[in-house]
Amino acid sequence: MAWFFSEYEPKNFYTFTGEQARHISLSLRMKPGDELTICCGDNIYPCVIESIDKTSVTVKVCGKQKCDNEPDVSITLFQALPKGDKMDYIVQKAVELGVSRIVPFTSARCVSRPDMLKAPKKTARWQKIALQAAQQSRRCIIPVVEDITTIKNAAEIAAGLEGSIVFYECGGQSPSELVKLNASEIGIFIGSEGGFAPEEIEMLNGLGIEAATLGKRILRAETAPIAALSVIMYITGNLG
C-alpha cells in the first residue's frame, strides 16, 4: 500500500496537492477506491481515494493506528563523503535499515571535495532520497540528512550521544562488545574510500569513540555503512 507523510493530523478527509498529488495520479496511476496510508507522527491512517486528478487527490480517512515500524534505538550515521553518487545509495539503504539521522562529513582521505557553495543542493537531494526511502520502507519518521561538515564537528556531535563507535579498516573490537543492548542512541562513523587517517582515529578515541571492526575483509565505502547498520540493528534486537 502506498505510504505518504503529513505534517498535520488528517481528520475525516485529506487532500494531497503538488508533487504528492502528481505522484499518486501520474506515477502510481491510482484511481478512486484505491487505498493508501498517511503517516503523521506516531500514527498511521488508512485511507481510500475519493477523487483524483493531476493537481489534487482527496482521500477519506478510515481509521487511526499506532505506527510501530521504528527501531527502539536512534542511530546517527556519520558518513565520510565517498566518490561520485555513492552517497545517494548510502542514504537510501541507511534509511531503509532504520537510521535516524545522517551526518555527511569531509575527512583527510576523502577524494570527494564538494564545492561548499553547491553543498546545499546535494543535501537537498539526499533529503529527498531519504523521504522516498522512508515512504518505501514504511518508516514512521523521515530521517534528517544534515549539512556537510568536518570530521571535527561530526566528532563533537557524536561525543554528546549516549555512545558512538568508529568502524576502522585497521581493526578494532567486535561491535557486540561495544554496543549496549539497551542503548537508546548510537553514533557510528564510516570512512570514505581511503579510510581514516591515524590522527583522526586518535582524535575520535580521545573523545571516547572507540574503534570497531567489520571483520578481516575490507568493504567498499558504500557497503560498510549498510553492513554496520545491519549488525547494530541485529545486536539491539531490531532486525530479525
Image (cartoon, helix red, strand yellow):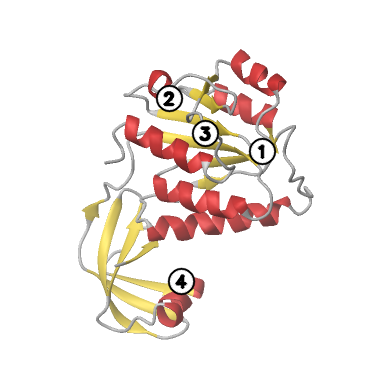
Question: What is the C-alpha distance between the residues marked 4 and 1?
Answer: 31 Å
Q: Give the mark, 3 or 1, whose residue is nearer the N terminus.
A: 1
For residue 188, say whether it is visible. yes
Q: Pointers 1 and 2 in contact (CB under 8 A)?
A: no
Q: Is residue 105 left or right of residue 39?
A: right
Which one is closest to the eye, mark 4 or mark 3?
Answer: 3
Tell me the residue that label 1 is attached to: 105
Q: Give the mark, 1 or 2, whose residue is nearer the N terminus.
A: 1
Question: Which amino acid type is shown beneath numbered disc 3?
Answer: Arg
Q: Residues within 10 Å of mark 3 (few under 14, many from 20)?
A: few
Which numbered marker is on residue 217? 3
Tell me the residue that label 4 is attached to: 20
Q: Position of residue 113 (x, y in %)?
A: 77, 45
Image height of 34 relative to 160, above or below:
below
Q: Give the mark, 3 or 2, whose residue is nearer the N terminus.
A: 2
Image height of 24 relative to 127, above or below:
below
Tell me the residue that label 2 is attached to: 175
Q: Secondary structure at mark 4?
A: helix
Question: Which amino acid type is shown beneath numbered disc 4?
Answer: Gln
Question: Image point 65% across, 33% down: which residue?
Answer: 195
Q: Position of residue 112 (x, y in %)?
A: 74, 46
Q: How many marks?
A: 4
Question: What is the C-alpha distance between the residues marked 4 and 2?
Answer: 40 Å
Return the residue nearer the eye: 42 or 205. 205
Which one is closest to the eye, mark 4 or mark 1?
Answer: 1
Question: Which amino acid type is shown beneath numbered disc 2?
Answer: Pro
Q: Is residue 14 left or right of residue 155?
A: left
Q: Give the mark, 4 or 2, whose residue is nearer the N terminus.
A: 4
Question: What is the C-alpha distance between the residues marked 3 and 2?
Answer: 15 Å
